[in-house]
Image (spheres, helix red, strand yellow):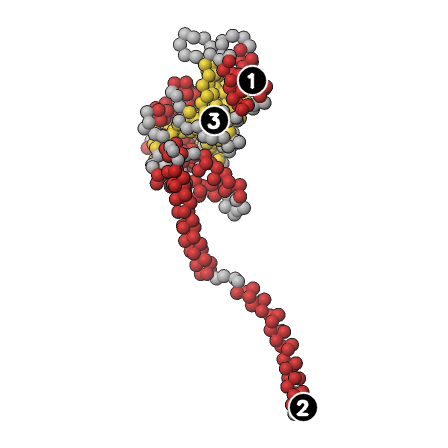
Amino acid sequence: MAKKKTAVRKKTTARRPAATSRSTAKPKAASSSRRKTPAQLLSAAAKLDQEILKLINQRAQLTINWIESQEDPRRALFSPEISDAPVAAVVDKNAGPLSNHAVAGVLQHVLAGARRKVRLKRVAYLGPAYSYSHQAAIERFGEAADLIPVSTIASVFEEVNRGHAEFGIVPIENSTDGRIVDTLDMFTRLPLRICGEVQLSVHHNLLAKCGRSEISEIYSKPQAFSQCRNWLNRHMPHARLHDVTSTSTAAQLARDKPGAAAIASAKAAVEYGLQIVAEDVQDNKNNVTRFAVIGDQTPTPTGKDRTALLLQIPHKPGALADALVAFKKQKVNLSWIESFPLRGPESGYLFFLDFEGHEKEPKIKRTIDSLARNAVRIEVLGSFPRSEPVW
């Protein structure tokens, strides 16, 4: 009996190495099993799509609930708290592979869709569709907003002032041409505020249905021609230039008239069935237009704000220099100043000032009070979050 027990023990001992060998091979098998087939990847993506669908609807509902909980839901619709701030926070945490612009666009569309469920908001812009103003309106409000094209900058202001639109979007300055006179002039006429801004990179293209050698005339708005002046002189000296009210109108003419071309956006080329004969024809490759969002809101401070105001001071030597000392004393960065003559028989100028900070900040209040003590007229046009250029 003792021999049999010994034999059993030896047999058991002999099997142990084999068991150890099998256990060390298991990780390799597990590693290979983690590699998903294309079908498995699609299945996993489909499940994730369902989760995303559920989450974006939950996110939209929270936005709707927040707006409806406010004392004035109409004013809350485009509050930075539910538009600029959430987008900035998400972009700040973005680790890729999607670009910041792509990530921001996704959230902006969700928020725009939520706002539309509360109440469809009308936004007036300088049309027709596919103009740069239209692109800026989509960038700020999303495609879910009710975007209303009008024919002039003055009409944008009038639509908002009459209550036909809650907001308007108008160009205010360009990095090549400077101020947009029609916009600044309307601020002197109507009591509207700036409640936001969009900085849009403007890429001009030569569009036509024919080759460059067949182009005899080119249409665009005066500002676009000015921003492409050197390129046109070098490459299209034989073509006649015709001013129109917008780049989209120019694209329509290029589509309909033989031998005609337009300076307009790539999106206009797609919309009107035109070829891009030459792209990026602007003289300044970093060509940016800043658009103002106009309405009657006063956004709350974000810490990265801008304030704009109109200022009229006595028309005498040294008056402007004395007024601007207020910015130095309060250490406020004056980022932009423009002047234009007063209308009528009165001599003097009205100044448009743009500076960093929010009108509710103590040092900005002190700066405005100092300006007011020596002003003939002063009007704060608004404080709003500063934006970054959209490339």
State left or right for residue 7 relative to residue 305: right
Residue 262, can we see it?
A: no
Crowd band around label 2 with a 10 angstrom C-alpha radius: few (<14), some (14–19), many (20+)? few
- Image position, residue 174 (x, y; %): 48, 26
Q: Nearer the viewer, mark 2 or mark 1?
A: 2
Residue 193 is situated, as x and y percent measured from the top left of the image, at 42, 25
Q: Which residue is mark 3?
A: 383
Q: Is residue 182 above or below residue 71?
A: above
The answer to which quarter of the image holds residue 244 is: top left
Secondary structure under the numbered disc 3 in the rendered image: strand
Type of amino acid under label 3:
Ser
Look at the picture and state if 276 lies above or below 1: above
- CA–CA distance in space, label 3 to label 2: 98 Å
Under mark 2, the amino acid is: Ala
Q: CA distance from mark 3 to mark 1?
A: 18 Å
Query: Is residue 47 or residue 358 the one in the foreground?
Result: 358
Residue that appears at 53% across and 16% down: 370
Of callouts 3 and 1, the N-terminal one:
1
Are the two marked residues, 2 and 1, in contact with CB atoms closer than 8 angstroms?
Answer: no
Amino acid of disc 1: Ala
User: Closer to the camera, 206 or 92?
Assistant: 92
Q: Which residue is mark 2?
A: 2
How packed is label 3: few (under 14 Cα within 10 Å), some, or many (20 or more)?
A: many
> Which residue in the protein does label 1 denote?
326
- Quarter of the image where the N terminus is located: bottom right
Residue 294 position within the rendered picture, expressed as x and y whole percent measured from the top left = 41, 27
Q: Residue at x 43, y 56 (%)?
A: 47
Q: Is residue 313 above or below residue 75?
A: above
Secondary structure under tag 2 reads helix
Density class for disc 1 (Cα within 10 Å; few <14, some 14-19, many ≥20) is some
Query: Is there a contact, CB below 8 Å, between mark 3 and mark 1?
Result: no
Q: Secondary structure at mark 1?
A: helix
